[in-house]
Image (tube, rainbow, N blue to C red):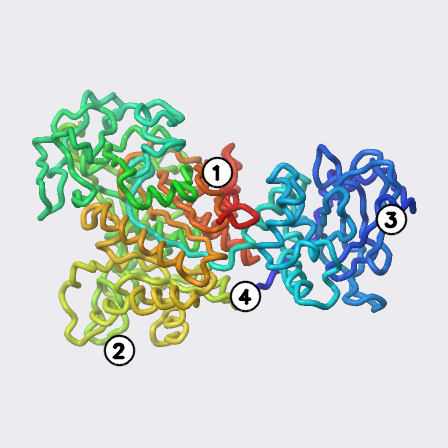
Amino acid sequence: MKLGFALRPLPMLLVAAGFGAALVACGGNTGDVASNKGQVIGSYYENAQVCVESATTKLTCAAGAPTARTAADGTFSMTATVTGPILAIIGTDAIRHEAKGDAGTKVTQTMLFRAAAGHSNFVSAISTELVAIMDGNGGDYAAATTKLAAKLGVAEASLTADFNQSGADQAKLKAESNSVLPVLAAAATQSNPADILNTMNAGLALNNIKNIVVIYAENRGFDNLYGLFPGADGVPGVNPTSKSAYVAQKDFDGSTLPVLPPVWGGMTAAGQTPVITQAQTVNLPNKPFQIDDTKSALYLSQAVVTRDLVHRFYNNQMQINGGKNDKFAAYSDAGALTMGYYDGSKMKLWDIAKQYALADNLFIGAFGGSFLTHQYLICACAPQYPNANTSVAAGSISKIDVDANGNFVRLTPAATATSTVLNGAATYANDSTLTPADATGMYYAVNTMQPAYQPSSNAPAASDGTRLYADTSKATTLPPQTQKNIGDLLSAQNIDWAWYAGAWKDSTALTTAAARPTALPSPPNFQFHHQPFNFFAEMDPVKNAAFRAAHLKDYDTQFLSDVAAGTLPPVAFYKPQGNLNQHAGYASVADGDAHIADVISKLKASPQWKNMLVIVTYDENGGFYDHVAPPKGDRWGPGTRVPAILVSPYVKKGTVDHTQYDSASVLRAITRRFSLPVLDGITTRDKALVANGGKAMGDFSASLALVPQE
C-alpha cells in the first residue's frame, strides 16, 4: 500500500504570528551549558531550531528561553535559564542526513517535534507522539511510555534511544517515525499554534487506523433511534440531556397545529401486523411520541415495518424550515408518523454505542433522500445532468418557487393542494428528480435516478447485446458521472478500496440475464440507487471491467471472507441489502439492528481489528423528525441530523461525541488518514459553514485516543 502525500511549506503568517514571534521572545541565545542537551533525529536534522516550549502556548518557545541550532548530527545544547518540554522547529533551512557524515538533503516541508521535560535526549516524531499522549493523560510520562511501547511492540527503553541504529525495536520505531512525519508536516501548514496542535493530534489519532470500514444504514433520524440515549442531545421534553425545548409543529401557513395530522394510510406497511389504521392516529398531541411504547394504543414493536415517509431533496428543506424544524408534519406524506421515535435501549447497536462512542451531532451531507446522500458520501457533490431540458428527462425538472434572489422557497404547490395539512398531505405541481438549471445552466439529479450500468432498475435496451447497460431512453437513467470521487483519489495514490453491497452478485446476475425478471426478489430487496459508484463512468462494465470488479464487490461471497482472512482494503464501504438496512416501508429496525451488530462482531474478530475504525451511520433521516437545527452550509446541505456509532480499539470508550460532523466527515477522515487531496465539495462546504458563522465539520478524530483503549 502506497501512502503518498504532498504538503505545502509553512505559511508566512505562521512564521510571523506564531513561531517567529515566539522565537524572538526567546532571545536567540545559543549557549553551551549541558543542562538541555539532546539530538533531533529521524534521520539526523542539521540546523533545526530548538527551544524550551512555552507552558501556556504549546508549540511556541517559552519567553526568555534560549534557542539553539542543531549540528550536522542533530545534536544541540542550550543554557538552563528555563526548563520544560523541548520544541524543535525543522524548517526548510534545515538539512536531513540519512547517515552521519553524508552530504544530506534539504528539508522541503516544515515539521515540529516535541519532547517531554527531562527526556530530550532524542527529539523525534516518536517523542512528539509521546508528548501528545501525555497531553491527554495529565502529563504522566511513565504511563504514556508504557502505552506507546505496548502499541508499537517495543521495549520502553527503546523509546528514548536512537532508532537510527540497527535492531528490531529500532526498525519498528523507524517505521512509526516515517508514518508520523507526514502528519507533522501536514499540521505545520496551519496558520497558528493552536490549529497546528489540533491538526497534529487529529492526524496522530487517525494515523493509528489502517482500515476504515463504513457501514451505511438507511433512513433514521437521531431522535428516532437514539433520542433517549443518556448524555445525548435527545428528544426535547423527554431526554433530560436534550439541549433545547420542543418547538411545536406548524401548518403550511405557519400557524401552530392544534394536533398532529393523522398518519395518512395508517402506520403499518402492507402485510404487517398488528395493523394501526389512519383512524387510530387522529388527534395525536403536537409533540414527539414513542412508537414502541407498550402502554400506547399505537404500540408497534421494532420488529414491525412501518409505512414509508417522504424523504426527498426539496421536502427536507421545507421540513427543516430554516432550522426551526417545525414543518416535518406539514410536509410529510405520513402525517404524524414523522414525529415517532423508539426506545433505542432495546437495540444491540445501542449497547455497542454505549461501549464505544455515539456521535450526536452528525448531519446528512445533502438534503433529502438516499440517492443524493449516497452520492454525497463518495464525492461531496450532486450528480449532474447536462442539457436536461432537451433530454428525455425534460419532464423531470422540478417546479419550485424562489425568492427575489433566486433562493429556494418551496416546491410549487399543486393547483388542488389543500390549505391545511389536517385535511391531507401536501401535493405539488412537479416534485421530481432534477433541479431547474443553475446560473451555469447545469441541472442536477437530487431524487432517485437509476445508474446507466447494471444492476439498474431500468432493463437493458433491446439493442444492447451485452445486457450490461441500462436503457438510456428512460427518463430515470442518469448519464454516467465524471466528477471526482473518493475512489479516484485513493486509486491515484495506489491505496486499495472497495464498495461491498448485500446481494450485489445475485442482483447483477438477475438484471443481466437473458430472461430478466420483471421484479427482483424481496428479500433481499436490492436497492439499485444505493450503489453510488455504479453511477460513475469509470465503472463502465465493458471499458473498465477489471477496475469495476476490483472495487464493486459482494457481501456474502467477498466481504465476509475478506473480513475473516484480514484482507479488507484500507477503505471499505458496506451497504446492507434492502431488508436489512432499517429503511421504513420495507425493513424493520430490529432486523437491521441485529444484522449490523453481527457485522460488527465479525469485524472485531478479524485479524485487522486492532487498527480498524468502523463508522456506522445513516444515509438520511427517512423523513423522521429531529429537533436539532442543521448548521447553515451550501445549496446541497447539510440536512437533518442522523446517528453515527464509532467502533474501534482506539475509540474513547463510553463517550458521546458532540463534535459537529456531516456525512462527508467520512471523506474527511479518509482524506486526512491517507494524505489525499481534498475534494472540492468538502472545501466548499466548510467555507460555507464558516461564512455563515459556523465552523468546519470534523473528521472523527475527536473520538479517537492515541493509544488502544482495549
**Reading the chain from its start, which is encountered first: label 1 or label 2?**
2
Q: For the point 87% across and 42% down, which residue is it?
A: 28
Q: Nearer the viewer, mark 2 or mark 3?
A: 3
Labels 3 and 1 touching (C-beta < 8 A): no
Q: Amino acid at mark 1?
A: Thr
Q: Secondary structure at mark 3?
A: strand
- Place of residue 689 in the rendered image (x, y in percent of width and height, measured from the top left): 49, 38
Query: For the residue carrying disc 1, how many other residues have a C-alpha within 10 Å: few (<14), some (14-19), or many (20+)?
Result: some
Q: Which residue is mark 1?
A: 659
Q: CA distance from mark 1 to mark 2?
A: 48 Å
Q: Quadrant of residue 4?
A: bottom right
Looking at the rendering, which quadrant does residue 85 occupy?
top right
User: What is the C-alpha distance between the residues marked 2 and 3?
Assistant: 73 Å
Q: Is residue 315 left or right of residue 193?
A: left
Q: Secondary structure at mark 4?
A: loop
Three-letter amino acid code at the position of disc 3? Ser
Above/below status of 282 relative to 100: above
**Where does label 4 land, which residue?**
493
Question: For this rendering, which residue is in front, 157 or 133?
Answer: 157
From the image, state whether disc 2 or disc 4 is nearer to you.
Answer: 4
Report the label total: 4
Check the picture and name the quadrant holding the N terminus.
bottom right
- How far is the residue under mark 3 from the one under mark 1? 42 Å
On the picture, is 514 further left or further right than 370? left
The residue that disc 3 covers is 77
Contact (CB < 8 A) between labels 4 and 1? no
Q: Which residue is mark 2?
A: 466
Ranked by sequence position, the earlier of labels 3 and 1 is: 3
Decide if residue 258 is on the left or right side of residue 16: left
- Which residue is painted at 28% across and 54% down in the image? 595
